[in-house]
Image: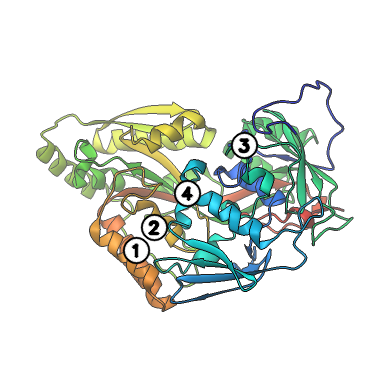
Amino acid sequence: MKALALLPLLCCCSPQPAELTVANGAELDSFDPQLATSAGSTRLLSAVYDCMTAIDPLSGELLTELASSFESSDSNRQWRFVLRSDARWSDGSALTLTDVRDSWRRLQRPSTAAPYSDWLNDAKIEIVAGALQVNFSTPQPLFATYCTYHALAPIPAILRQATPGVIPDNMIYSGPYKIVEHRIRDFTRLAINTEHADFSTESFATIDFLSVDSQWTSLNLYLDSQVDFIPEVPQLALDKLQQQYPDAINITPSFASYFVRLQQDDQQLLHNKNLRKALSLAIDREQLVELIGGSRRPSATLVPDLLPNYVSPKATSTDYEAARAALAVAVRDLGEQHIAIDYLYPSSEMNRTIAEFLQQQWQSVLGIKVSLNQLEAKSFFPLQKSQEYQTSHSTWIGDYFDPFTFLELFQSGHRNNRSSFSNIEYDSLLAQAQRCADAAQRLEILARAEKILLDEYAIIPLCFDSNIQLLRPSISGHTANKFGIIQWQHLRRQ
């Protein structure tokens, strides 16, 4: 397989369809698990790489996967992982502690430019007494949970030695499937990994992940029986699909939020808190979720309300009178009679609907002129990261089942803090929560941090997302869940 993410196969013939076909969305951003961040990449990589730990899709319980056991000590500054004795790569060779150690050291290296390198920061990673030992300078209570994510999945030596982002020939994998073919902007074919501990002859022998930019094209392929599974369904088709295909549609709450990022450095209009407050209070979130559908729920907070022991602080969602009053103060403070802002968003049917709704709300309630700037994802994310915008669409899917996965986004200097928000008390509370050994007290500290974020109107929460999937009823073995987890090797055609 030549430079998997870069070179198409020269053969122009079409292969026979796989036993299972998935419309996976746009072309993957990377096949390298340490570099990939998109939802489509996460879906595919979950089939070809096992992690040290895993999340039970129904209970949310933290489980072992490649690790047979793990433990922490020294107030979560030290973690130890014992590897399963039957851990194997897809070529039958042993997956070793050396593989795990060297994979994590690669993640740390600045030359890898891995988005999640800070999960290991200055950690010392070594093999001690038959276990992988990781020593941190500060408490890391969530590290075993981080290990459920593909960024910390062990990768083979051939990939560790390659240029980051280039997938070499003769790749091997640790998951229930392996990649056997890729055609750029067409499909990626997986074949069953017979060396996997969970191998079964009843699993699908092959799976095709199609690269399909348009959700409408994906739906047409499903209706034409060319696709079995669509992870994301077009909003405008949802009502009719629920009526005509009730056994195929699965809708579950998702551990994900929609919100607006606000560029608020001291050179920006949105440095003014009252202007940020006005924009937030002028949005009718009930009307928004009715418009976009999908059983999404309005929210005035950031952290989804799916955590059993975490309660977000109360926050006002919609108040037109208070919004106009805040705007009047902002106009006086800024000396700007006619405020105009831009809204940046990545192109999709639903994102456009949200953008046009916000534009209408801000113009009709506040009289603010709003310019919409739609970009393809490959252009949107670099621009958002460089903070070259005023207001910007944002969606965040929790990488792990804890409020910290949302709240850390707004730490000063965090890689995903793309709005220049910085608050000393907020940073202090997050650091305090990381040191706290009492689970209940830790969540209370995090809720205090979220309250600062909301009181400062650092973001504009919109709604909590849903997982909306279309799966052919003849396929069993999948239970829709709030984590979006799909155990590919458990799927069967009845």
Separation of marks 1 and 4 at Cα, in angstroms: 18 Å
Q: Which residue is mark 4?
A: 396
Q: Quadrant of the N terminus?
A: top right
Q: Which mark is residue 175?
A: none
Above or below, 426 against 64 in this view is above
Q: To which residue does mark 3 refer?
A: 28
Query: Of label 1 and label 4, which has the lower sequence position?
Result: 4
Between the C-alphas of marks 1 and 2, the distance is: 8 Å
Residue 119 shows up from this direction: yes
Q: Position of residue 39 (x, y in %)?
A: 58, 44
Q: Secondary structure at mark 3?
A: loop
Secondary structure category for the residue under label 2: helix
Gap in angstroms between the C-alphas marked 3 and 2: 27 Å
Q: Earlier in the sequence, mark 3 or mark 2?
A: 3
Up the image or down, 172 lies above or below 81; here it is above
Q: Amino acid at mark 2?
A: Leu
The residue at 76%/25% (across/down) is: 9
Q: Is residue 335 above or below residue 110?
A: above
**What distance separates the C-alpha of mark 3 from that of mark 4?**
18 Å
Q: Nearer the viewer, residue 409 or 322?
A: 409
**Cβ atoms at labels 3 and 2 below 8 Å apart:** no
* Residue type beneath disc 1: Leu
Gap in angstroms between the C-alphas marked 4 and 2 = 11 Å
> Taking the image as drawn, is residue 483 in sight?
no
How many C-alpha atoms fall within 10 Å of the one at disc 4: few (<14), some, or many (≥20)?
A: some
Please tell me whether residue 160 is drawn above or below residue 301 in the rendered image. above
Residue 407 disc label: 2
Q: Position of residue 331 (x, y in %)?
A: 14, 37
Element at label 4 = strand
**Residue tagged 1:** 430
